[in-house]
């Protein structure tokens, strides 16, 4: 494969990634407010809005880092990351799920990846400072509220998954977990615990090249999602 063709394919994969991020939030918001969901617990409206805002900010941060700072520099790595998202989306749709359901599953996969990543970093941080197993246990217990909110936000996946046979449900959860794993691996390389990349200058050039379109796309996506959620909650 020539360098020129490889560069074109790489740019196409990167733009596909940004297009997917532009669609995920609005479709996920549409599903969250329209799905007949039995929430595992009832939260007061202010607390629910606060939780939604926190997870929205976390999701935007994660996607910004992936698109600008730690998107794989190789064609193979980029195709693997984007392929995980496409595979999960296709898996839900192929099982009879709607596009909003598939988008919400992708949204949830990123949130689950973030919680696991935060847990890993907290444990590593405590391990560096205090090697006691009790300290690591205390760190994990401190993450329970965040994990509880992720469990809460898993509820909209119920309508999409519960109608499927158990084997198909297991497959969809497996694909979701594998996609979350790819996101964890990509974001972990940005953390202070990962070895310094040898090609840091190349990552910096990618950051500068993709910052503007990434920020514009994610802002428009977030605004559209908020508007759709607001309109849907009043219908």
Image (cartoon, grey):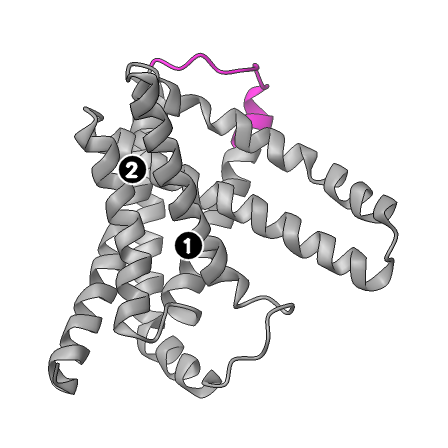
Give left or right: position of 79 versus 127: left
Number of numbered tags placed on the structure image: 2
Q: CA distance from mark 1 to mark 2?
A: 17 Å
Decide if residue 196 is on the left or right side of residue 223.
Answer: right
Callout in the foreground (1, 2): 1
Say which of 144 and 1 sits in front: 1
Segment colored magenta: 36-49
Residue 228 percent location from the top left of the image: 29, 33
Instruction: Give coordinates of residue 213: x percent, y percent.
Output: 28, 67
Q: For the point 30% across and 60% down, which residue is it?
A: 80
The residue where tag 2 is placed is 103
Q: Identify the residue shown where x is 50% and y is 41%.
A: 112
Residue 42 appears in view = yes
| Residue neighbourhood size for the residue with mark 1, other residues' Cα within 10 Å, grouped as few (<14), some (14–19), many (≥20) | some
Q: Say which residue appears at 16% left-offset and 71% top-offset.
A: 9
Is residue 26 rendered to the left or right of residue 147?
A: left
Mark linked to residue 182: 1
The residue lying toward the viewer, choosing from 132 and 235, is: 132
Q: Position of residue 176 (x, y in %)?
A: 38, 39
Q: Observer-nearest residue: 86 or 145?
A: 86
């Amino acid at each position: 494969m020539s360098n020129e063709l490889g560069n074109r394919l790489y740019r196409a994969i990167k733009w596909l990634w940004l297009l997917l991020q532009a669609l995920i939030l609005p479709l996920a918001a549409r599903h969250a407010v329209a799905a007949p969901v039995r929430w595992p617990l009832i939260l007061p409206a202010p607390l629910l809005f606060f939780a939604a805002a926190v997870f929205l900010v976390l999701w935007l941060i994660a996607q910004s880092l992936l698109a600008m700072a730690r998107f794989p520099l190789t064609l193979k790595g980029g195709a693997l990351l984007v392929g995980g998202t496409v595979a999960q989306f296709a898996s839900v749709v192929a099982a009879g799920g709607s596009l909003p359901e598939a988008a919400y599953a992708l949204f949830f996969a990123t949130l689950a990846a973030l919680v696991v990543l935060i847990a890993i970093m907290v444990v590593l941080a405590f391990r560096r400072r205090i090697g006691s197993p009790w300290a690591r246990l205390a760190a994990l217990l401190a993450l329970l509220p965040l994990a509880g909110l992720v469990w809460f936000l898993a509820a909209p996946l119920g309508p999409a998954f519960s109608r499927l046979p158990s084997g198909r449900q297991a497959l969809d959860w497996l694909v979701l977990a594998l996609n979350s794993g790819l996101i964890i691996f990509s974001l972990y390389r940005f953390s202070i615990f990962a070895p310094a990349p040898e090609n840091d200058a190349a990552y910096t050039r990618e950051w500068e090249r993709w910052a503007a379109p990434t920020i514009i796309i994610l802002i428009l996506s977030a605004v559209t999602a908020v508007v759709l959620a607001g309109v849907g909650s009043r219908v």
